[in-house]
Image (cartoon, grey):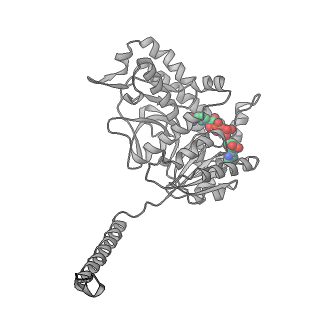
Amino acid sequence: MEMLSWENVDHTILQKILLLFICISLFWKIIRYMCGLLYPETEPVTVLVTGAAGQIGYALVPMIARGVMLGPNQPVILHMLDIEPAADSLKGVKMELIDAAFPLLRGVVATTDVAEACKGVNIAVMVGGFPRKEGMERKDVMSKNVSIYKAQASALEQHAASDCKVLVVANPANTNALILKEFAPSIPEKNITCLTRLDHNRALGQISERLSVHVSDVKNVIIWGNHSSTQYPDVNHATINTSSGQKPVKELVADDNWLNTEFISTVQQRGAAIIKARKLSSALSAASAACDHIHDWVLGTPKGSWVSMGVYSDGSYGIQPGLIYSFPVTCEKGDWNIVQELKIDELCREKMDKTAEELIEEKTLAKSCLNSLPMFT
Ligand SMILES: NC(=O)c1ccc[n+]([C@@H]2O[C@H](COP(=O)([O-])OP(=O)(O)OC[C@H]3O[C@@H](n4cnc5c(N)ncnc54)[C@H](O)[C@@H]3O)[C@@H](O)[C@H]2O)c1
């Protein structure tokens, strides 16, 4: 019997197999290179969170790092700012972010230096601020926040990306956003907004509870005005997705008295109810709403639905231009637009004007804190 030896093996077949392997591996490398050209790795987005050592900050930063804010394929770099007394706590948050090994997190800066925090920022979520303490006058709180927001606006103006999108969460959110707009004139005014999405989500939640429907089937509620107890949660245009199509919320609730009284006051007073129950203000829902706000602003609202955002008034619905007022908006390609031509009934008009009046008063108060500055005319 002939022995199988190296000499007996047909060398040309071996050479052919080897050549085939080399060709396949070369071909695979070329395909991967071409795919890399077509789909380059997404550049990370730098997100600033101020007041990051606080309770909203602690709930918010892991959501951002997990892709809740900008989607599951968007890498992020987190910049976290807080004040000196919270520096150790901020360091601890950074350690926890590293320990959580978030795949999308490409860098973390934890600092008490506002210039460092604002450097190259694409999205700024302004949560830090001075809280109202027992016995403090409204004017004193406003005065503290005016100076914080003036300083942070200047830092964003100098160090952030020129197309930076800003969301102000800290209260008084609308007026803090207005101050920020005044002192960061090179950031487009359409890029400065405040959070009323929490109130919007609270309104969706109340309707969903009342009708025992899934919250994702409720849409197009509106929060008009200030993020305060004068806000007007409006369900006149809201609908429910049912097995027989879209139905108006008003028709399904079939209780205008509840909608015009208890529903409104529950949404307006929800923050206070949470403080009473938790002995702390809402944090996880505020963080989640901040993610929703930026998510929809950057990635768009679904066709046929809108959300509420505190934005710079252009005079729509007779609201004085120059206020940051919550309107219904649709978002597309990173831009928001106020939903126009909604029918406004008498009650709605009255409530929209009342919350606008409060914002005008807040603006006057802020102006008196900054009365040497000419832009508040
Ligand atoms: N718009 C909304 O829907 C909404 C909802 C809930 C809370 N809020 C507001 O959000 C803010 C934060 O709430 P919280 O519960 O996280 O408060 P918190 O007190 O737990 O945290 C605030 C953090 O801000 C920091 N801070 C203070 N001054 C700062 C400054 N100049 N620069 C940077 N950081 C600073 C504090 O050190 C603290 O860590 C409050 O103003 C609260 O009223 C708004």
Which corner quadrant of the image does residue 115 belong to?
bottom right
For residue 243, above or below residue 374:
above
Count of numbered circles on the image? 0
Q: Is residue 163 visible?
A: yes
Please tell me in which quarter of the rendered image ligand 1 is found: top right
Q: Position of residue 295 (x, y in %)?
A: 45, 44
- List x then y, in percent, for residue 357: 55, 28
Question: Which quarter of the image is occupied by the C terminus?
Answer: top right
Position of 99 with respect to 354 (left or right) is: right
19 lies left or right of 221: left
Instruction: Give the residue at the far front of this rendering.
Output: 1
x, y (%) of residue 156? Answer: 59, 54
Image point (65%, 26%), residue name: 278
Q: Is residue 363 visible?
A: no
User: Which one is nearer the viewer's eye here, 300 or 179?
Assistant: 300
Vertical position of residue 326 compared to residue 353: above or below: below
Q: Residue at x 64, y 31 (%)?
A: 281
Q: Which of 76/102 is in front?
A: 102
Which of the two residues, 98 or 8, is positioned nearer the viewer here? Answer: 8
Quadrant into which the N terminus falls: bottom left
The relative height of residue 285 versus residue 46 in the rendered view (above or below) is above
- List x then y, in percent, for residue 262: 51, 15
- In the drawing, does residue 63 fall left or right of residue 340? right
